[in-house]
Image: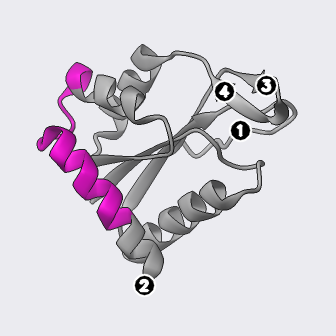
Amino acid sequence: MRVGIVTDTYAPQVNGVTTVVRRIVTLLGAQGHEAAVVAPRYPDHRDSTTGTELRIASVPFPPYPDIRLSLPSSRRVARFFDGFRPQLITTEVVTAGVALRVHHASDVLAGGALGLAAAVAAAYLLFLR
């Protein structure tokens, strides 16, 4: 299965969300699945060259400058997922709106919002194994 993951925090940031997302990617790979991650770009961080990550331009969150806020990039995300062709997309934290816009743009989620909720639940079940 090909799984798209949209998150508002990822490496090099270290926190619970990043840990969960990295664990999901690792577990999916160990079970023969592919994952592609959309995440904010961090200054001085070298982006992956594997083609399975899309880093979005971001700005610092004023109260916590180490936290990055992604700038709107729904067309770029749609093109990225059009190329990756995920069978489902899951989101972490507050980026669900981006994934739903991608869904409408590229029809990658057959189940709509229900499919999105199922994907989130499946990802957490994988993490808990």
Which is more N-terminal, label 4 or label 1?
Answer: 1
- Where disc 1 sits, the SS reads loop
Please name the residue that numbered disc 4 is placed on: 69
- Density class for disc 3 (Cα within 10 Å; few <14, some 14-19, many ≥20) is some
Q: Disc 1 to disc 3, how far (Cα)?
A: 18 Å
- What residue range appears in magenta? 104-123
- The residue where tag 1 is placed is 47
Q: Amino acid at mark 2?
A: Arg
Q: Where is residue 112, by image quadrant?
A: top left
Question: Residue 6 lies in magenta, yes or no?
Answer: no
What's the amino acid at mark 4?
Leu
Q: Which residue is mark 3?
A: 60
Q: If you read the primary sequence from the N terminus, does the residue marked by circle 4 or circle 2 appear first?
A: 4
Q: Quick check: can you spot residue 115?
A: yes
Compared across the picture, whether 93 is left or right of 125 comes to: right
**Residue at (79, 39) in percent of width and height:** 46
**Mark 2 nearby-residue class (10 Å; few <14, some 14–19, many ≥20):** few
Is the C-beta separation of discs 3 and 4 under 8 Å?
yes
Instruction: Find residue 124 and name its label.
Output: none
Residue type of the residue flagged with mark 1: Asp
User: Which residue occupies 26% across, 51% down?
Assistant: 117
Sequence-wise first label, 3 or 2: 3
Q: CA distance from mark 4 to mark 2?
A: 31 Å
Circle 2 residue: 129
